[in-house]
Image (spheres, rainbow, N blue to C red):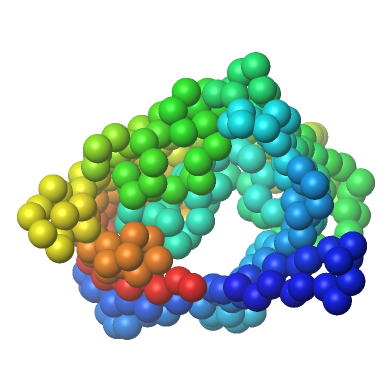
Amino acid sequence: MLVVTPAVADEPTFVIQPGGYLQPGLRLIQNSPVGNDEDGFTLTHVRPTLRLSHADGGVTYSAYLEADTTPQFQLLDAYVAATGDFVEGVDAGWRIALGQLKPPISRATLVSDADLQLPTKAQLTTIAPDRQLGLSATVNLPFLPWLELSAGFFNGDGKNLATNPDENFMFVGRVAVRPIGPRAKLIESALGPDSVSVAGSAATVKLAHGTYDETDTTLGADGFVSWNGLSATAEILNVHHSFSAGAPLPDYNSLGLEIQAGYLLPLPGFFDRKIEVGGRFEQIDRNDTVPIPQPGNADQTQEHFTLFISYYHFKHDLKLQIMASHIVELEDRTASGQNASYDNDSIIAQVTFRL
């Protein structure tokens, strides 16, 4: 962190915080006729970050940049924000952000890739809205600090698109009840303060596809609890895709479910609360109407049963994580009736180092 102190007392002081994280690893996956079964070392993320901030009275103004450089460069976050408290001494406040950022729609999506219990995010994040250009606001009211309200509107076309050619917007709302740890950072595991949160969220966007339109309506609910080394999270997300006349697809739903839990072992000495064991169950169905053409199709309905063990040397900033997954193809027949089950169980090990 670099603090830039002005030469004149009345001029603002700026704080510059460069950072980032690196996540190398190893993946082992069963061989099968379906592709994407290569064993080998991986480099999941190489992400530089930069935060600029300036406090002026009770308001902190900031700018944040985050990019991913593997397998190729892409801009992720790029926004300016203002944050403040309503009443001094009361854990309640507000935040407004403008730029490219995550819509407040899914807890699993909102948690940083560096703050996960497992090397990979839950599959349901693949059906949640991605980063978007837009405006969002969050408030914790002073008389109800445990009630967190978030809302925003975005272009709705995806990240790194500088314009909004269809002139439609995505509207997002999220309501979270957080009686314990009302403004704590969203992370997985019990490495942060004790926390309890239950939330519901919704989003809607209309997408133009030339000769027809698509309307996506997303509804989600999630919960999280962490206490004395034990943590658990659950989330369900449904996206209803509806199409106007002339579309090549019928209406369909995308549904994702995840339940995961972990326990930081109370071991003696140095390893106290540094080793975590746990598991995750998830189900993903990206298209509940159209049968898959071949095994391994991106829309194939699956269940994932995962066990994991993590070693936190310095919480989420320096950790080693190992997960083993058994994957079941619930959609086990193709559109032509052929067997669609295949071997794809995997073991993934990953190190995270964050500055």
Residue 343 visible in this rendered orientation of the protein: no
The relative height of residue 242 versus residue 80 in the rendered view (above or below) is above
| Direction left: furthest residue | 268
Residue 49 visible in this rendered orientation of the protein: yes
Q: Image check: 337 left or right of 94?
A: left
Can you say which quadrant of the picture contains the N terminus?
Answer: bottom right
Q: Give the percent coordinates (x, y) of residue 192.
A: 38, 46
Residue 322 position by quadrant: bottom left
Q: Image check: 167 left or right of 355?
A: right
Q: Residue at x 43, y 56 (%)?
A: 115
Q: Residue at x 33, y 53 (%)?
A: 117
The relative height of residue 295 versus residue 39 in the rendered view (above or below) is above
Residue 136 position by quadrant: top right
Q: Say which of 128 and 142 sits in front.
A: 142
Residue 344 position by quadrant: bottom left
The relative height of residue 183 versus residue 352 in the rendered view (above or below) is above
Q: Give the percent coordinates (x, y) of residue 238.
A: 54, 33
Q: Residue at x 49, y 45 (%)?
A: 186
